[in-house]
Amino acid sequence: RNERGLPAQGRRRLKKLAKRMWLATINIGTMTGRSRELANSLKERKVDVACVQETKWAGAKSREIGEGYKLIYHCKKTTQNGVGVVVSQWIRDTVTEVAQITGCLMSTIISMGTSTAGCPDEEKEKFCHELETHVQAIDDSENLFIGGDLNGHVGRAKDNFDCNHGGEGHGNCNEGGTWILEHAEAWDLAITNTFFKKGESHLITHYSGGQTSQIDYWMVGRQDFKMVTDTKVIPYNSIAPQHRLLVLDAKVHLVQTPARPTTKIERIKWWKLPARNDLAERFKTCTATTLGTTKPNQRFIDKQTWWWNDDVQQATKSKKDAYKTWRQTKPLKSTAKHTVATSKAAHYQDLYDQLDTPGGANKIYKLARARD
């Protein structure tokens, strides 16, 4: 310990882990008949959290939609829009609170999905007030993500909203887009769709009657914008008839609380044996007698005996017996080869001797006729 009475290595600090997360938003039109298709698409894109608008499932419930995803939705009537949040398998257990504010607004501690598409005009002010109240209630230490169909065109031009608009949008700004930009400025949010240079197909979120527009957005607090690495539309994804899936890629810093060290399993206190020399000697003698000892000065063989069984033992014994038999027959094989070679050499030597005699020429003629 140091002078302050703390451990010499210092205090145990909280570790921040950068977890890559994919967030998505889509106006599904209706969840009826599309839940499984949505789950497959989210799994293909490795999406962790998805904001869904126009679910049109009545009630405030949660439901499994397949591939480990759970939908938490809120809607008063099936004829109204309704919103929901889809969470993946690993993140569903960390959700501690779900706030169902209105039929167009839902919040969790992770993200918030909003939608004004289809809401009556008289509810616009109420929706705006509830959204502002909820955003202001979020602590500065928490990460804020807002995603959904906001039913407005922010356009390509920044229009003096340099801190909130990146200048990489689509089309022209309209009244709804001005409303989005004004509130983004008031709440210090950045519209991530407009900060990454993309082709038109990766910016357009809505197709209708040959017309294209960008009305689905992801917004984050400007102090958290450094976590966002990309935002783009998946153009070939056609879960909904008109809208396309908008995916945000971010590196979220998760705080990991260090676990307090504890003893793992029950252990015998072998370190006390030196104090009992007599007990240690008796234990050593008993162990050597029971288990046996190895022979010194032998060639070391690394034997992995954890997979050894009777079948392996029998096969190994048969191989050794066959090897011994082969070693015993090896001298006999050498003797046979030597005998054959000796007999063959003697025969040819006798033939050569006969050819050297006066009648050897006749012998050669006989050998030639025999070969013909």
Image (cartoon, rainbow, N blue to C red):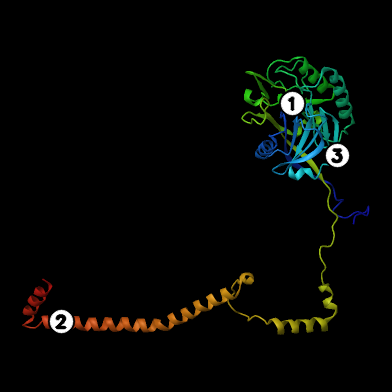
Residue 340, quarter of the rendered image: bottom left
For disc 3, the neighbor class at 10 Å (few under 14, some 14 to 19, many from 20) is: few
Q: Position of residue 351 (x, y in %)?
A: 15, 81
CA separation, marks 3 and 1? Answer: 24 Å
Tell me: residue 251, above or below residue 240. below
Does label 1 or label 2 sit earlier along the sequence? 1
- Report x, y in % for residue 10: 86, 51
Q: Is residue 199 visible?
A: no
Is 190 left, or right, of 346 in this rendering?
A: right
Mark 2 or mark 3, earlier in chain: 3
**Residue 351: mark in rendering:** 2
Q: Is residue 219 left or right of residue 238?
A: right
Q: Residue at x 66, y 26 (%)?
A: 241
Q: Quadrant of residue 47?
A: top right
Q: Disc 1 on helix, strand or loop?
A: strand
Residue that numbered label 1 is attached to: 217
Q: Are marks 1 and 2 in contact (CB under 8 Å)?
A: no
The one of 191 and 347 positioned closer to us in this rendering: 191
Other residues around mark 2 within 10 Å, as few (<14) / some (14–19) / many (≥20):
few
* Amino acid type for the residue under numbered disc 2: Leu
Whether 121 is drawn above or below 370: the answer is above
Q: Splitting the image into 4 quarters, where does residue 335 fall? A: bottom left
Assess disc 1: are there few (<14), some (14-19) or many (≥20) residues with their C-alpha within 10 Å of its C-alpha.
many
Q: Amino acid at mark 1?
A: Tyr
Q: Position of residue 314 (x, y in %)?
A: 55, 77
Q: Nearer the viewer, residue 156 or 330?
A: 156
Disc 3 designates what residue? 97
